[in-house]
Amino acid sequence: MDNTTEHIKTLIIGSGPAGYTAAIYAARADMKPVVYTGMEPGGQLTTTTEVDNFPGYPEGVDGPSMMVQLQQQAERFGTEVRIGLATAVQFAAEPGGLHKVVIDGAKQLTANTVIIATGASAKYLGIPSEQRLRGGGVSACAVCDGFFYKGQEVAIVGGGDTAAEEASYLANICSKVTMLVRKDQMRASKAMQHRVESIENIAIRYNTEVDEVLGEQVVEGLRMVNNQTGEKEEIAITGLFIAIGHKPNTDIFKGQLEMDEVGYIQTKGKSTKTNLPGVFACGDAQDKEYRQAVTAAGTGCMAALDAERYMATLEV
C-alpha cells in the first residue's frame, strides 16, 4: 500500500457519458475534477458501433469516437483523466468530511466531493458466439440499436418486463420478432404479457434457450434448443437482443450508500444526492429506468451542479 495520500477537490469515478459530462461542468466551475476511468474507459458506448440517437450528431457517430470526443472536451477545460479502478471507499458521514478512496488497491486519495458514474453492465448469456458477435448484430439495447434492423427478422432473449417492452418496441420496427423465454411462462407483469401476446409479429418460444448464434462477421441466424425436449431448431435472423437484465457497477459502495435490491444507488428526489453528504451518483449506476447516453449525460450535469452547490456551503 502506498503510504502517500493525494487530495483531490472533485473525484469522478467512471468515464462514460455521465462521468465526462460531470467533468465538463465541474472543470468549468473550477472544481479541478479528476476522472478515474475504471476498467472500461468510455463505458458501455465503447462496445456500440453506431450511435444515432444522441443530439448533435446528424450523421450519427460510432460509440468509441464519441467517447474520445467527450474526453477531449472535458480535458479542454482542465479535467485530468487517469486510467485506474476504484477498489475501496470510505465515505465521510458528516458534511465537510473527507472521503477516502483507494485506486487499484494501492493509491490512496482523499476528496472533498465524489461523483459516482460507474455505470451498469448488461448481462449476457456468456456463450462464445454471442460474445464474438457483440457489435455485429448482438445487442443488449433494443432502443439503441433496433433502428438498424428495420424490416428485418430478429430475436430477443428474456421473459421479464424489460424483454416484453423491448419486444413490443422491436415489433413496430422489424418484420418479425422471435422471443425466447427460458421457462414455461414469462415473469413479466400480466399486462405486459397480454400486450406481447396480442402483437401478431411476435412469436414467443417458451422453454427455449440460445444454443448458438450463427454467422462469422455478423449475425445470420440462431440455433435454439428446447430445454425440455433437447430439440434444436435454426432460424434466420440478422439481430439478437439480450434482455436478461443489467447489473449496476456499485459493489464497492455497498454498506455505505443506500441502494435498491439490485444495487442501483438511491438518490434523493430529482437530485443526484446520495444518503451521504458530498457523494453524488449519476448515469446508469442510479438510473434503471432509461439507461440512455443522453439521460446519463443529463444526470452527469446535475451531479456536477449538485457538487458545486455542496462545495459552496463548505467554502472549500
Image (cartoon, grey):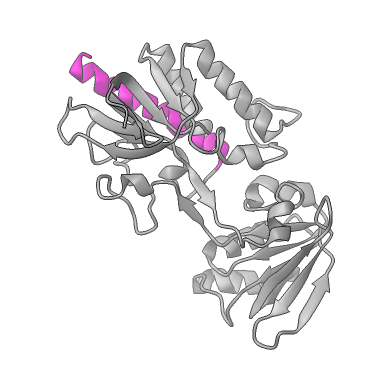
Seen at 71% across and 30% down, the residue is 61
The residues colored magenta run 292-316
Decide: is 252 above or below 224. Answer: above
Decide: is 166 above or below 284. Answer: below
Question: Is 177 situated left or right of 86 in this image?
Answer: right
Q: Quadrant of residue 151?
A: bottom right
Total marks shown come to: 0
Q: Is residue 209 magenta?
A: no
Q: Quadrant of residue 252?
A: top left
On the rendered image, what quadrant is the N terminus found in? top left
Q: What secondary structure do most residues of the magenta stretch adopt? A: helix
Decide: is 174 above or below 53. Answer: below
Question: Is 312 situated left or right of 294 in this image?
Answer: left
Q: Quick one: 305 or 211, which is closer to the camera? A: 211
Q: Quick one: 307 or 170, which is closer to the camera? A: 307
Q: Is residue 305 magenta?
A: yes
Q: Position of residue 94 (x, y in %)?
A: 15, 32
- Residue 75: tell me if it is visible: yes
Question: Is 126 situated left or right of 99 in this image?
Answer: right
